[in-house]
Each structure stands twice: as structure tokens, then as C-alpha cells.
């Protein structure tokens, strides 16, 4: 169960590269998310991260996104309501990356 | 309303027996009974009060007769039976109200009072004085006794129906039927007269003196004076001799019905016993004309007295009209019958005269014929002064034709003599074999010339036969002549033989035969077989008839066997008696030399054309002359005509129609002169063939025929011949007619031009179509109507002005119907919708007539078409308005109304765009509704029109010119300059006044509907506000979910209610109730009870106590009786519910394990039905953690044909099924699962409460992998704790952050040494979650993108965050206030 909770795919053929995340991100698997981001951002002037199918994520994920946003331009596709919105605004991430509504 | 809780009624007298609000209830209430025979109402016995109640509440006519005086009390429905003259008759003794019928009903009523037994009277005659005269009235009624308190009959109760109309209608019908039978019978009688029929009619009317006390029929004589010819009902009919002047006038005017005051002398003479009601003399009589046919002459007058016991109403007039019509019909029949008889007699007389005339004239013909034939014969045979060849030829023609004429005359004479019975055979003993042989031999040349073979087999008889030898000769020669005439190939055979005592002669041929249908008529005189092919068409049609007569005179028989195209055999048998004596035998009958023989005639049929005349070469006309084709089968006639015409025109000849047709096609003659009766193809056939061929269609044709008389001429001209010349004709006449016909043909072109001009000058559209509907010609008016022109001719069906099926199937179908009538040749008139070339719809009234093209004989149709679009629109307008009103009637809201209205208007006017602008109060922008719906900017045309129109008075129509010249119509929608409607038409034609008027009409209707809709919407808004105000609280404590569905749309309030009242921190009052009834009235009661219950609970009452006090309150509230209420108090701290139920269906409690319990330990009766001093029961039930409580009203569980218990167990099962879901989802699941297939029929209120489950307690090692486990446990617990999804997600993140912090900072051991503890519990709507670890806690750091973001996040997501750090570890407490 624990292993199956996260599925991250990186599409580097896309311009900008696209990271699609499905599942839950927490301390237990945030490394996988972080390395995918690093992979996608490698040499890319910008990347897109699609979090629209993420059912849970917390500040661990935010930290990973902050690190990536320092290296490249990040566009986030995420719900603009609910806890995700609170997460993005309270952590100030929405000031650092571009957030596009998942809908 | 009845008090069902028991106890004796406080006293009947307290309540008025005069129930309802009808006229009679009001009158009875107002009546001063104290001075009446019945005394004051308070003193009335209960039986009377009950009876009066029943009487007044019935819609059926009812009356009560009370007491020994039979005092009247009656209801509204009985008022018409009493009649305007007597009403009101309340409280009066029956005998004084109905004196005129008291002798009947008085006795019946008293009998009921005495015996107590009911009576029933069916169609009883009761003479009634209701409208100022004594009336013959019929009633069906029943008298039944009303038992008073002593058990005796205190009065009589009557239910009654008036049957006068039916009884009288049936009587009228009987009378009319009898009249019909009697007069038809009289009219059909041979030798009938108008007088007989009138006599029978009056006699028949005597059977209904109830209605017609006396009647008479007056014949109108030649001076116009009425003379009585039949009467009934009068003791002395002679009084009719003195007729009043009005009768004369009526006869002269011929009006359908005239009324007459009955003269005193007539009234005095009326025989008694006419009507059962009495013997009052009639005062009025009706006079009606007796006419021949519908509008024919008035030949008589029917006078019918009107019974004094009925008013002369519509039905009675109808009855008299029908009687007069029946007599008129019978008299017409009789007159027709008389005329027919006279005609038959005249015909018989004529026939006799004709036979005599034939006999005389035939005889007279013989002398001049002999004097013509004799000298001609002499001249031909004169050897001393021999004739030149031309003269000889001419005289031969004369000789031959006088001979033929002579023979015809002889035949006619013979026939006439036989018919007159004057011919007797002069029998001699003849050697029949020899005689016959000789006759056949004489015919041989004619047979041979015709190219036929002759077989002759005459072997017997051996003995002489007794025959009239002249007659035998005629028989044989006629049969032979017939055979040659109709046999074109093959042979003719003659057999003579003896067969015992008969001699048999048979003549067979291989000719054309006789159609089977013609055989029965073969021996009728003047009958000529039609359609057979013969050598000549000459003949009189008497040959075979004469043969048959001659055979009959010899006591013989004749028969024929024939098969078409195979041949015929005529067989004659004559008696052949044994020889009795030695009478001299006439061995060889001599033949009369002066009789022109049939042989000569038969030879003529086969005379080659070369034998006929040829004009002398010097008489030939110049080559430019017109060419005339002469068609005639008689060679002499053909020669004669040719001779006459040849000097003037070129003449070509043909012997029959077939040959003529070929010549006509080849030579294109300028005129064709043809005989009518010819072999192969007759004149009519030739004409038809010529006309159907375009090469010869317009060649003038002139008929020549021996059949004189107008009929023959009309037949020829009808068939399309140009002229008709009957034989005999003179040379001069023939020349003149041929010349004029040739002239006429030359002028025909000029005429054709004139005709076109004439048609074009017609005001109505005119067109000409061929038999398949192709329009081949039309006039200017028709082109103007349709927009098409003559250049497009011909226009085949379907014409371009017929709407296409795909565009307007209805219009297409109408045209198709017209077209089918056209194809059937029905003609007539019909109105069809057409499409003008420019696309607009027109309606045309068409009228078709069938004609025959005089040139071609083809069927054609001439039609006229009139533009009736305007008329049509006017009649459609009414239909449109009613359709529009119907469409609008279905809509209640202003928005839907406008939407429907603009769609309708667009359809009616074929509009391009429609816009409605509604301005609310104040300066808010107008609300626009557009058709078609579009997001584009509002149409400028329409905006301008709306601004113009909205300031104008109501119902005024503004017409403006829009873009592209298309008209814009606009009208205000109220008189306050706020709203208006505008519409732009699709077509560019100007707006007609009809359109404008219709638009005004429809928009006015819309305006008034809109006003109604706005009022309705206001009422609805009030109702909704009311509902929200009284239904129940909108903010509920945590754990509750409610649903309310009203039964009665659109007012969303009803008798059901729920209430949740926070009494203290731990105590919540819960109420569900159900008032009787629905709608606003029930809602008002509900509101009061709800407020009262709420107040009682807030005051601190226990549920049972609250209900007891509510009883007191409910008794004072009208219509609160039988309201059911469930009242409970939930104590969340004690986890218990205390409840009491006033007749309400028991709520269900389902625990977390799925065990369900009904809360039915404290059931008692509904509101106000509980005894005043009774104590309602109360029970308490423990609430297990996580249990779900369902309160509901009966609408949720009730289903037709199902017990309440079934419904309750269904609800309980559904609750168990959904027990782990959030209360809102439980409520949705229950509403969906329990809904009947067609939706809820009654109000439904339901309330779900979730008692908090046991606290969530998790203890796990502080490792990352367990973060997910914590989330899963929380996701399972929260819905059961009635926490919604949004709150859950917030908490997951807040708890997740706290737990992640603990894990992250659990130390180098990766958290395995440190335990993480998460607990969650609900107390008084507060959810408290604690995340605690046994390690160290790091306070937040200000790093922008690293750690420490957790705490602000928790603060954002939870209402309160408390962090306590001790030596043993850190505890984060997250509190969240919960709402339902």
C-alpha cells in the first residue's frame, strides 16, 4: 500500500517538461517527488508540475517545489480551493511559482 | 370537524342546521322561523335538523315536507322546479304552494306520513303553475318518510328530477314518426292526390292532440285563397270556412312560421279531451307553408293549434317545423307521382300513335316511290331514246335507291301491320326445298362478289310445307343478307332439313359474331348491334325483328348461337304437319320483279370505288383551292357528294373512318366531311382520332348523318365536330355549309387572339390545365397572384407556387388534396395556401370546372383563383389568439411567459427577431429577453422601437422601418413606460393593418398575462419567505441533517415540520410534527404549533410535559386536531434521548453495528385527541456512540396498498444501510431509497442525528510510513463523526503537518524509539484533535523556504492551535468548531 501511494511521471519531451503527480505526497515519499522535479528541471528553462490529481500533500512537497523554483521557472497546475490552496498561500509558494487552476 | 375523543355533544341546538353558503342556506338562516308553523329553530327535533342538513348540502333537487301541514323546506337545486312565481315558499304549507297538483301529491304525501312507506313515481304528470300558465310538467320522484324522535313519520323527504323535456321530446318524436309513415304511405299510393296526403297527415296529427289540440290544412287556390281540405280536433270543421285575414297574409308571405290568435269561433269548436291537464281552449296557432321541394311553390298551409299547457318554445317550434317539412315532402312526392303517372300514360298513347303513323306514312310513301322508280326504270330501259352514259349513271343511282327505299318502307309497313295484329300469313303448300334453293342461288353473286364461299345443303323436306311463300322469302333473304353484311372472310352455309314434325333452316357464317350482351336484344325492333364490324353500316334495325315476327306468325321458333370473331348461326324451325290432303303444290314461288331485291343491295356493299363518279375533267378546281376529304360508306352518297364539291374544291374520298384517317394524315385536307355510321371506324371514332393527332387536331370536321333531329346534332357537336348536316340535304345547302366552314377555319387564328385578350382582362386569376394538372395557359391576374409568368409555361404538377412538402407539409397536403380532386374530375371549389414567387404566403380560393377541348376532345380544366389571403388571415387571427393564449396559460413565471410569448410571436408573424424589455423599479437596467437567443449586442432596430413604444399608451402598436426596409412592430407591455416588446418581420413587404391589429391583440394579451404572472410571483415569494420563517432553523447544531419536500407545488410549505433547539450546551430539543392537510392553511397551523413546542421546550419542559401543554394550546387552534408530534431531548453528555410521541410514527435509532431500534415506548394519541387530564407517557433510550437517529413524517414511508409497518421497516433497513455515511449523505440516501416510483405524494420532513462515535485514538511509532496510516484512520472516523469532507481535508493537512514535524524531529533513531499519538473527540460541537510525541519539539524558524511552515498552516486550517512542549514530548492540540 505504502509503495503504491505515489506515481510521478516526467515527460521531458514536452516543452516545457511536464511532471505529473498522482496520489499522496508526504515525508515518506517526498524524495521521489524531489528527484523527479530535479530530473525535469535539469537544463530546462521552465517546467510544469501537474498536481491536479494529488489527493494529499503537505509542506514537505512545498519544500521540494521551493528548491526547484530556485533553479527554474515553475508552473503549477493545482486546485485553487480547499487545503491545497491554503497550503500554497500560507507557505507563500504561490508568490514564487505560477499557479494555474486545475479546472 | 368532529370531536373524536368521545363525550356527548354539548347540545344540537348550539349549531345551526343551515349548512353551506347557498342561497337557500342563507334564506333559511335569515328566515324568522319563530312565527312559522315549525316554530323557532332551537325547538326543531334532531331528525328535522339532520334532514335539513342533508337537503342543503346536496346538489340534487331535494325538498322536505314537514309536519302535518307538510311545511316546505328545499335546497338551491329545487328552486327551478318550484319556478319563479312561487319562490321563495319557505315554511309554507305544501297545499298552499302547490294547489294545482295537490290532488295528486297531497294524497301521496299524506299516505307516506300515515303509513311511513316510501313511494316512487316515474314520469308523473303534475300540472304546475310556474310561469303564469298551467303547465304540463312531468317529474320522477320518490317520497320517503323522515322518522322523528318518536319513531313516527315526522315529515317527508323528496328527491326529484324534472323529466318534462324528455317526456315531451319522446312524444314529439312518436308523432313525427307516425306522421312520416302515414304521409309516405298516402304519397306512394297510385292515383294519390294532394288532398289524400293532406288528409292522411291531419289524421295522423290527431294522434297527438296533447300538443296540437286541432289542426287543418288549407289548399291555396289559384286566387291565392286558402280553402280548408282537411282538419282534425274540431267538432264542426265548417268554422274554418271563415278564415282570418292573417291566414291569407301568411299564405301570401310564405314565411316559415306565422303565429295566429285562434278566433273565438274556432276555439269554441275544439273537441274536448285533447290534453290530460284540462280542456282550456288553445289561444295560439302556428301556420306553416306546405311547399313543393325546398324552395318550391306553396301549395297549402298547415295550421296547428298550440296546446295551452306549453309555452311555444324552441323545441315546440322545431317539432312543428319538422311536421310541416314532412307534409311538404309527402305532398311533393305525391305531385311527382301524379306527374309520373301522367307521363307514362302519355307515352303509351304516343307509342300507339307512332305505330299508326308508321303504317299510314309507309303506305303513303309507296305511291310516290313507285312513280319515281317506274319512270327511272323506263328511261334506263328505253331502247328507242337511249340515255347517254352520264345520264344513265345518274338514273341508275335513282333506280337503285328508290328500290332500297321501297324495301325499307315495305318492311316498316309489314312490321306496323304485324304490330297492329293485322297481318295473317297466307299459307300454301310449298315445295320448300326448291323455293329455298332458288332464293339461295339468287344470292350467290352477291356472296361471290364479297369474296365469300357459299355452301348449300338442301336435302329435304320431301313433302310440301304449308307456308306463306312471300314471308318465307323475306325470312331467307334477310338472314342471307345479314350473313353477307357481317362476314368479311370465309363462308356462308345454308342447311334445310326435316326433324320429325319440324322443318329446320339454319344460316351460318364465319363473320364477326354478336357480343353475348347483345343477343337478348337481337330480335327487338330498331335494335342495332353495336361495335360489330360489317360491310356496311346501313340498316334500319328491323330486319331480324321482322324475321322473328314472321317466324312467329308461322308458329315457328328462331334462335341464334354466336361467338364473337368466330361466327353466328341462325336456326329457324317451323311445324311440319303430316300431309292431310292433296292440296295443290306451288312448286316454284314466283318473285316479284318490281321489288328491289336485297340481293341488289348486298351487291352494292362490295362495289369497288372505281365504279363511283368521277367528275368531268373540265370541272376540276384550280390547284390552289382548298382540299375536302369525303368519308362515306354508301357508294352512291359518296359519288353524289364528290360530284357536288368537285367543281369548287379538291376532293379526296374514303369509304370508312380508317381509310379516312390515313388520307387525312397524308393530305392534310382543309375540311373533312364524314358520315357518322360506317364500318371499321365510325365518324365519332374518326373525329377522336383526328383530334388526338396534333397534325389533324385543328382540321374542321363536318358530320353528315341520316339520323336527323337535335339529339343527333348535339351528340356530334359535343364530340367536337365543327358542323353537322343532316340527310337529306340539298346540293345548295351542302355547298354553303362547306364554304362557310372553310371560311371559319381561316378566321380561327384571329379568334384565338381575341379570346386571349378577353381572358387577360378578367379580374380573377384564370388558368387552363390539362388532364394531368399541367398548367398550360393562364391570364395576367393569375401571374400577378403567383408572381410567375407565362414565359415559364407549361407548369407541370407540382407547380412552383405549391409549397414544398419539406417546407410546409400541411400546406402541401392541402394542395395535394385539391390536386386529387382535380384528377378525379370532381372540380368544385377549394382554398389552398400557395407560395408567391417572392416567398410570401398567399391563400387562393380556386374553382375548377371540367371542359372538353373542342379540337382534341381531351379533358381540360379551367380554373379561377382569387386572392383570399386577407380573409384567411382574419379567420386565422382568432385561432392564433386562442393558440397564443393557450401557450401562455401553461406558464406561471414571468420569465417563462415572455420566453414562450416571443417564440409564439416569432412563429405567428414569421419574425426575424423579437425583443422584450422589462424594467424593474428604480433605475436598474432593463431585463432583456431576445428571440432568437444570442449573446450578440441587442438589436439596434428593436432597441429603438422599444424606447419609442414604451412611452405610448397600452395596446397601441408602433410601426417603424428597420434595416433592409423590413418592418419593425412594437407595443408597450404596461402603461408605465417601463416595458415593451418589439419585433422585426422577416419579409420586406409593408405591414398590413391586419398584422398590426393582430400584433396589438397578442401583445395586449401578453401584457395582461404578465401582470398576472407578476402577482403570482409575488405571492410565491411571500409563501417562500413564510416557509423559511416557520419551517425550521437553517443553522443546525453539529451532527444534524434535515430534508423537507413539499407535496404541493409551487407553495413550498405544508403541514410537516421539524425543529432542532439548542436548550443548553449538552441538551438539544428535537421535534418532528405533521398537521392535517396541506398548503398555506396547514402551514399556518404548523407555524403556531412549532413555535409553541419550541417555547415549551425552551422553558425547560420535559418532552411529555411539553406535549401535554401543547394539547391545551392545540385545542384552541382551529384545524390543529389530530396533528402528530414527536418531541425529544437529546442529552449528549449523558448519551441518552428522552422522548414522547403524540401519535407520530416512531423514529428509528441505528447503532454503529447496524442494530436498529424504534422509539415507540412513549406512544400516545395525536394532539387535542388526548384526554384533558391525561398524562402523556415518556421514555428514555441510551444513545450508543456513533448511533444514527432518524425522525420523519409519514410522507416518507407511506405507499399505496402497503401497511405503515412495511414502510417503517423499509426506512429502518435504509438507515442501517447508510449508517456509516455522513448525516447529509444518510439523508440523501434515505430520500432516494424510499421515494415511490412516481415521487413523494405527501409532504416529507426528515431529520437525521449522528451521536458522536467513540474518540479516535492512534498510537504508532513516529516513522514517515505511518503518516499515511494516520490519514487513513482519520478518513474512516470523520464521516461517522458527522464531519464533512471539506473539514476532513483541512484537518488531514493540519494533523499531517503536526505529525510530520514530530516524525522529522523524532531524532536520529528515525523515530522508532519515539511514539506518535493522535486522538480526536467531539464535545459539544467542538472537534479536538491532539497530536503528541514523546520527543522534542522545535519551535518555528523564520526560514523562508524551509521548515517551520507547519505552524502557520495549522493555524490557517484549525480554529485554535495550542502547542505544549514538555520534557517528555510535544503535544499539538487542534480545535475546530463544527456546524451541521
Image (spheres, coloured by chain):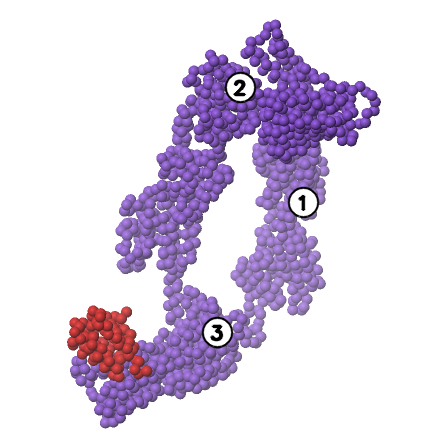
Place of residue B13 in the rendered image (x, y in percent of width and height, measured from the top left) = 57, 69
Q: Nearer the viewer, mark 3 or mark 2?
A: 2
Q: Is residue B274 visible in the rendered structure shown here?
A: yes
Query: Which label's residue is closer to the chain start, 1 or 2?
Result: 1
Q: Secondary structure at mark 1?
A: loop
Residue that mark 3 sits on: B1197
Q: Determine the secondary structure under disc 3.
A: loop
Q: Residue at x 34, y 86 (%)?
A: B1256
Write the residue at 70% across / 35% down.
Answer: B189
Q: Is residue B262 visible?
A: no
Q: Is residue B1118 above or below residue B984?
A: below
Q: Percent position (x, y) of residue B1111?
A: 48, 77
Judge left or right: residue B1106 versus residue B402. left
* Viewer-proximal residue among B417 and B1103: B417
Q: Is residue B855 left or right of residue B551?
A: left
Task: Identify which residue, A84 or B1144, lies in the foreground.
Answer: A84
Going by the picture, which residue comes out furthest to the right? B581
Chain A is shown in which shade?
red
- Which hue belongs to chain B? purple
Amino acid at each position: 500500500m505504502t509503495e503504491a501511494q505515489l506515481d510521478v511521471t516526467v515527460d521531458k519531451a514536452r516543452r516545457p517538461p511536464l511532471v505529473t503527480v498522482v496520489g499522496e505526497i508526504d515525508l515518506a515519499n517526498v524524495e521521489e517527488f524531489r528527484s523527479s522535479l530535479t530530473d525535469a528541471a535539469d537544463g530546462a528553462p521552465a517546467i510544469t508540475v501537474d498536481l491536479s490529481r494529488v489527493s494529499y500533500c503537505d509542506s514537505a512537497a512545498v519544500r521540494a517545489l521551493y528548491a526547484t523554483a530556485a533553479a527554474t521557472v515553475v508552473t503549477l497546475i493545482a486546485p485553487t480551493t480547499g487545503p491545497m490552496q491554503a497550503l500554497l498561500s500560507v507557505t507563500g509558494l504561490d508568490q514564487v511559482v505560477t499557479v494555474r487552476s486545475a479546472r | 370537524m368532529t370531536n373524536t375523543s368521545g363525550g356527548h355533544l354539548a347540545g344540537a341546538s348550539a349549531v345551526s342546521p343551515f349548512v353551506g353558503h347557498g342561497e337557500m342556506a342563507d334564506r333559511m338562516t335569515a328566515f324568522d322561523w319563530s312565527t312559522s308553523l315549525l316554530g323557532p329553530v332551537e325547538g326543531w327535533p334532531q331528525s328535522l335538523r339532520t334532514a335539513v342538513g342533508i337537503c342543503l348540502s346536496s346538489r340534487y333537487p331535494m325538498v322536505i315536507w314537514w309536519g302535518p301541514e307538510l311545511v316546505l323546506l328545499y335546497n338551491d337545486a329545487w328552486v327551478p322546479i318550484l319556478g319563479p312565481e312561487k319562490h321563495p315558499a319557505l315554511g309554507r304549507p305544501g297545499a298552499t304552494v302547490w294547489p294545482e297538483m295537490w290532488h295528486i301529491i297531497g294524497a301521496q304525501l299524506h299516505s307516506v306520513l300515515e303509513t311511513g312507506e316510501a313511494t316512487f313515481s316515474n314520469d308523473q304528470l303534475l300540472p304546475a303553475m310556474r310561469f303564469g300558465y298551467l303547465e304540463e310538467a312531468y317529474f320522477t320522484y320518490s317520497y320517503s318518510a323522515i322518522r322523528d324522535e318518536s319513531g313516527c313519520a315526522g315529515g317527508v323527504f323528496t328527491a326529484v328530477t324534472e323529466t318534462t323535456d324528455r317526456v315531451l321530446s319522446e312524444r314529439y318524436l312518436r308523432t313525427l314518426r307516425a306522421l312520416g309513415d302515414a304521409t309516405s304511405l298516402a304519397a306512394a299510393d297510385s292515383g294519390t292526390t294532394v288532398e289524400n296526403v293532406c288528409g292522411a297527415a291531419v289524421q295522423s296529427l290527431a294522434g297527438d292532440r296533447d300538443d296540437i289540440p286541432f289542426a287543418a290544412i288549407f289548399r291555396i287556390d289559384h286566387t291565392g285563397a286558402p280553402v280548408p281540405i282537411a282538419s282534425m280536433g274540431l267538432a264542426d270543421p265548417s268554422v274554418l270556412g271563415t278564415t282570418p285575414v292573417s291566414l291569407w297574409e301568411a299564405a301570401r308571405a310564405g314565411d316559415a312560421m306565422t303565429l295566429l290568435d285562434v278566433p273565438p269561433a274556432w276555439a269554441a269548436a275544439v273537441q274536448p279531451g285533447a290534453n290530460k291537464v284540462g280542456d282550456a281552449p288553445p289561444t295560439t296557432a302556428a301556420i306553416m307553408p306546405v311547399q313543393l321541394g325546398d324552395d318550391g311553390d306553396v301549395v297549402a298551409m298547415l295550421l296547428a293549434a298550440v296546446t295551452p299547457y306549453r309555452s311555444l318554445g324552441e323545441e315546440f317550434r322545431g317539432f312543428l317545423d319538422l311536421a310541416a317539412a314532412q307534409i311538404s315532402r309527402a305532398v311533393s312526392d305525391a305531385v311527382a307521382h301524379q306527374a309520373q303517372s301522367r307521363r307514362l300514360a302519355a307515352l303509351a298513347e304516343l307509342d300507339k300513335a307512332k305505330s299508326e303513323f308508321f303504317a299510314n306514312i309507309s303506305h303513303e310513301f309507296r305511291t310516290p316511290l313507285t312513280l319515281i322508280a317506274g319512270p327511272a326504270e323506263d328511261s334506263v330501259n328505253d331502247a328507242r331514246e337511249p340515255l347517254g352514259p352520264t345520264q344513265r349513271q345518274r338514273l341508275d343511282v335513282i333506280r337503285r335507291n328508290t328500290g332500297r327505299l321501297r324495301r325499307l318502307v315495305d318492311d316498316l309497313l309489314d312490321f306496323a301491320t304485324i304490330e297492329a295484329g293485322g297481318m295473317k300469313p297466307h299459307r300454301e303448300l310449298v315445295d320448300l326445298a326448291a323455293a329455298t334453293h332458288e332464293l339461295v342461288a339468287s344470292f350467290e353473286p352477291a356472296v361471290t362478289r364479297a369474296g365469300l364461299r357459299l355452301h348449300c345443303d338442301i336435302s329435304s323436306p320431301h313433302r310440301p310445307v304449308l307456308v306463306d311463300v312471300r314471308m318465307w322469302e323475306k325470312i331467307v333473304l334477310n338472314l342471307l343478307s345479314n350473313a353477307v353484311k357481317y362476314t368479311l372472310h370465309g363462308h356462308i352455309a345454308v342447311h334445310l332439313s326435316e326433324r320429325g314434325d319440324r322443318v329446320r333452316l339454319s344460316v351460318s357464317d364465319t363473320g364477326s359474331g354478336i357480343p353475348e350482351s347483345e343477343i337478348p336484344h337481337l330480335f327487338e325492333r330498331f335494335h342495332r348491334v353495336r361495335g360489330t364490324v360489317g360491310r356496311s353500316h346501313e340498316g334500319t334495325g328491323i330486319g331480324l325483328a321482322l324475321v322473328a315476327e314472321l317466324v312467329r306468325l308461322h308458329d315457328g321458333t328462331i334462335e341464334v348461337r354466336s361467338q364473337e370473331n368466330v361466327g353466328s348461326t341462325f336456326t329457324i324451325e317451323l311445324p311440319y304437319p303430316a300431309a292431310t290432303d292433296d292440296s295443290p303444290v306451288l312448286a316454284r314461288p314466283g318473285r316479284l320483279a318490281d321489288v328491289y331485291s336485297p340481293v341488289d343491295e348486298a351487291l352494292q356493299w362490295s362495289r369497288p370505288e372505281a365504279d363511283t363518279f368521277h367528275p368531268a375533267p373540265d370541272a376540276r378546281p384550280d390547284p390552289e383551292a382548298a382540299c375536302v376529304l369525303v368519308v362515306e360508306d354508301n357508294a352512291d352518297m359518296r359519288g353524289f357528294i364528290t360530284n357536288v364539291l368537285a367543281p369548287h374544291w379538291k376532293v379526296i374520298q374514303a369509304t370508312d373512318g380508317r381509310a379516312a384517317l390515313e388520307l387525312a394524315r397524308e393530305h392534310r385536307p382543309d375540311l373533312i366531311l364524314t358520315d357518322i355510321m360506317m364500318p371499321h371506324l365510325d365518324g365519332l371514332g374518326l373525329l377522336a382520332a383526328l383530334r388526338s393527332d396534333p397534325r389533324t387536331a385543328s382540321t374542321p370536321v363536318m358530320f353528315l348523318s341520316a339520323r336527323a333531329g337535335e339529339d343527333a346534332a348535339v351528340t356530334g357537336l359535343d364530340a367536337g365536330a365543327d358542323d353537322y348536316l343532316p340527310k337529306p340535304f340539298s346540293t345548295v345547302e351542302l355547298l354553303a355549309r362547306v364554304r362557310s366552314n372553310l371560311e371559319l377555319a381561316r378566321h380561327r387564328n384571329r379568334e384565338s387572339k381575341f379570346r386571349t385578350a378577353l381572358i387577360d382582362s378578367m379580374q380573377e386569376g384564370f388558368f387552363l390545365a390539362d388532364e394531368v394538372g399541367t398548367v398550360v395557359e393562364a391570364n395576367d391576374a393569375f401571374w400577378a397572384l403567383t408572381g410567375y409568368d407565362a414565359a415559364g409555361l407549361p407548369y407541370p404538377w407540382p407547380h412552383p407556387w405549391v409549397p414544398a412538402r419539406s417546407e410546409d407539409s400541411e400546406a402541401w397536403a392541402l394542395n395535394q388534396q385539391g390536386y386529387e380532386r382535380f384528377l378525379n374530375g370532381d372540380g368544385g371549389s377549394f382554398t389552398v395556401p400557395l407560395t408567391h414567387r417572392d416567398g410570401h404566403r398567399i391563400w387562393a380560393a380556386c374553382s375548377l370546372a371540367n371542359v372538353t377541348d373542342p379540337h382534341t376532345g381531351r379533358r381540360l380544366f379551367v380554373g379561377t383563383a382569387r386572392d383570399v389571403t386577407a380573409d384567411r388571415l382574419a379567420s386565422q387571427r382568432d385561432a392564433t389568439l386562442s393558440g397564443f393564449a393557450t401557450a401562455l396559460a401553461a406558464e406561471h413565471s414571468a420569465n417563462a411567459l415572455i420566453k414562450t410569448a416571443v417564440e409564439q410571436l416569432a412563429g405567428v408573424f414569421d419574425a426575424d427577431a423579437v425583443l422584450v424589455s422589462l424594467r424593474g423599479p428604480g433605475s436598474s437596467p432593463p431585463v432583456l429577453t431576445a428571440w432568437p437567443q444570442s449573446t450578440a449586442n441587442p438589436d439596434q432596430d428593436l432597441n429603438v422601437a422599444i424606447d419609442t413604444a414604451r412611452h405610448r399608451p397600452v395596446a397601441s402598436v408602433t410601426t417603424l422601418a428597420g434595416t433592409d426596409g423590413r418592418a419593425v412592430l412594437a407595443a408597450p407591455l404596461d402603461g408605465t413606460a417601463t416595458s415593451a416588446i418589439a419585433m422585426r418581420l422577416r419579409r420586406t413587404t409593408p405591414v398590413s393593418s391586419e398584422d398590426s391589429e393582430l400584433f396589438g391583440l397578442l401583445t395586449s394579451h401578453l401584457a395582461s398575462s404578465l401582470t398576472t404572472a407578476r402577482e403570482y410571483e409575488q405571492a410565491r415569494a411571500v409563501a417562500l419567505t413564510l416557509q423559511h420563517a416557520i419551517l425550521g432553523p437553517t443553522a443546525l447544531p453539529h451532527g444534524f441533517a434535515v430534508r423537507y419536500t413539499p407535496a404541493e407545488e409551487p407553495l413550498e410549505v405544508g403541514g410537516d415540520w421539524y425543529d432542532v433547539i439548542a436548550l443548553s450546551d449538552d441538551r438539544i430539543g428535537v421535534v418532528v410534527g405533521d398537521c392535517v392537510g396541506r398548503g398555506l392553511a396547514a402551514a399556518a397551523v404548523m407555524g403556531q404549533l412549532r413555535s409553541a413546542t419550541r417555547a415549551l421546550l425552551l422553558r425547560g419542559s420535559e418532552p411529555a410535559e411539553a406535549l401535554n401543554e401543547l394539547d391545551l394550546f392545540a385545542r384552541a387552534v382551529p384545524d390543529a386536531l389530530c396533528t402528530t408530534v414527536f418531541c425529544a431531548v437529546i442529552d449528549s453528555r449523558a448519551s441518552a434521548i428522552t422522548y414522547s410521541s403524540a401519535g407520530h410514527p416512531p423514529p428509528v435509532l441505528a447503532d454503529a453495528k447496524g442494530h436498529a431500534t424504534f422509539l415507540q415506548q412513549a406512544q400516545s394519541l395525536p394532539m387535542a385527541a388526548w384526554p384533558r387530564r391525561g398524562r402523556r407517557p415518556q421514555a428514555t433510550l441510551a444513545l450508543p456512540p456513533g448511533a444514527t437517529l432518524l425522525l420523519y413524517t409519514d410522507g416518507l414511508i407511506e405507499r399505496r396498498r402497503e401497511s405503515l409497518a412495511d414502510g417503517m421497516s423499509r426506512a429502518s433497513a435504509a438507515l442501517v444501510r447508510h449508517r456509516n455515511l455522513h448525516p447529509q449523505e444518510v439523508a440523501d440516501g434515505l430520500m432516494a431509497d424510499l421515494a415511490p416510483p412516481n415521487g413523494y405524494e405527501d409532504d416529507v420532513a426528515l431529520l437525521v442525528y449522528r451521536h458522536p462515535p467513540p474518540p479516535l485514538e492512534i498510537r504508532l511509532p513516529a516513522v514517515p510510513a505511518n503518516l499515511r496510516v494516520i490519514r487513513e484512520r482519520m478518513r474512516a472516523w470523520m464521516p461517522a463523526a458527522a464531519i464533512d469532507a471539506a473539514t476532513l481535508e483541512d484537518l488531514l493537512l493540519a494533523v499531517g503537518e503536526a505529525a510530520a514535524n514530530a516524525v522529522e524531529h523524532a531524532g536520529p533513531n528515525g523515530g522508532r524509539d519515539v511514539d506518535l499519538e493522535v486522538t480526536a473527540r467531539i464535545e459539544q460541537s467542538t472537534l479536538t484533535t491532539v497530536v503528541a510525541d514523546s520527543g522534542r519539539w522545535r519551535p518555528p524558524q523564520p526560514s523562508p523556504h524551509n521548515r517551520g511552515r507547519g505552524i502557520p498552516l495549522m493555524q490557517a486550517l484549525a480554529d485554535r492551535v495550542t502547542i505544549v512542549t514538555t520534557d517528555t514530548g510535544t503535544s499539538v492540540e487542534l480545535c475546530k468548531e463544527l456546524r451541521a
